Image (spheres, helix red, strand yellow):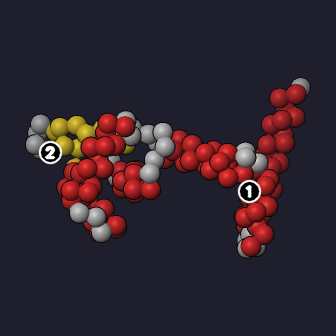
């Protein structure tokens, strides 16, 4: 599921705390983004139709509660794969090379990348056995 920038903001709100009432969601997005109530409610309706969020009526409270239907990890992975494919033709090494041409990586991130590559290499070795 591809999310627009505006939809990402709504999802961030719901990933931070869920479920949220429509009022809680509109208040949060007004504070963070400066959006009007109608903008937020329009986005929530659109995202319900898209299957990104669900709004359920709470009979006890008499309000509608919204919660995400997709996890952050799944959305982030899909976004990363789409970006990688679209911009770097699927090449992780080309992307890393491009990102590090203009700014140096902190040593901590370099160490994390080395560890990740070692784990991937070990996984490949085990798959071949």
Labelled pair 1, 2 in contact (Cβ < 8 Å) = no
Please tell me which residue is depicted at 56% across the width and 47% down the height of the picture: 79
How far across and how far down the image is residue 122, in percent?
A: 84, 40
**Is 3 in front, or is 77?**
3
How far is disc 1 from disc 2 in space, using C-alphas? Answer: 46 Å
Is 50 situated above or below 109? above
Task: In the rendered structure, find residue 63 and report the number of the disc placed on it.
Answer: 2
Is 87 situated above or below 31? above
Work out whether residue 48 can be spotted: yes
Where, quadrant-wise, is the C terminus in this rendering? top right
**Is 42 in front, or is 57?**
42
Q: Outermost residue toward the top?
A: 129
Q: Nearer the viewer, mark 1 or mark 2?
A: 1
The answer to whether residue 59 is left or right of residue 119 is: left
**Is 60 in front, or is 94?**
94
How far across and how far down the image is residue 84, in percent?
A: 67, 49
Task: In the rendered structure, find residue 95 and report the number of the disc placed on it.
Answer: 1
């Amino acid at each position: 599921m591809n999310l627009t920038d505006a939809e990402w903001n709504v999802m961030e709100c719901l990933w931070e705390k869920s479920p949220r009432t429509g009022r809680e969601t509109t208040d949060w997005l007004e504070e963070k983004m400066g959006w009007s109530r109608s903008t937020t409610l329009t986005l929530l309706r659109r995202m319900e139709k898209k299957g990104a969020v669900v709004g359920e009526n709470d009979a006890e409270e008499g309000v509608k509660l919204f919660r995400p239907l997709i996890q952050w990890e799944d959305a982030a992975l899909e976004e990363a794969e789409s970006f990688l494919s679209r911009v770097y033709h699927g090449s992780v090494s080309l992307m890393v090379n491009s990102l590090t041409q203009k700014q140096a990586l902190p040593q901590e991130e370099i160490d994390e990348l080395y560890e990740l590559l070692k784990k991937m290499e070990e996984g490949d070795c085990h798959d071949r056995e």
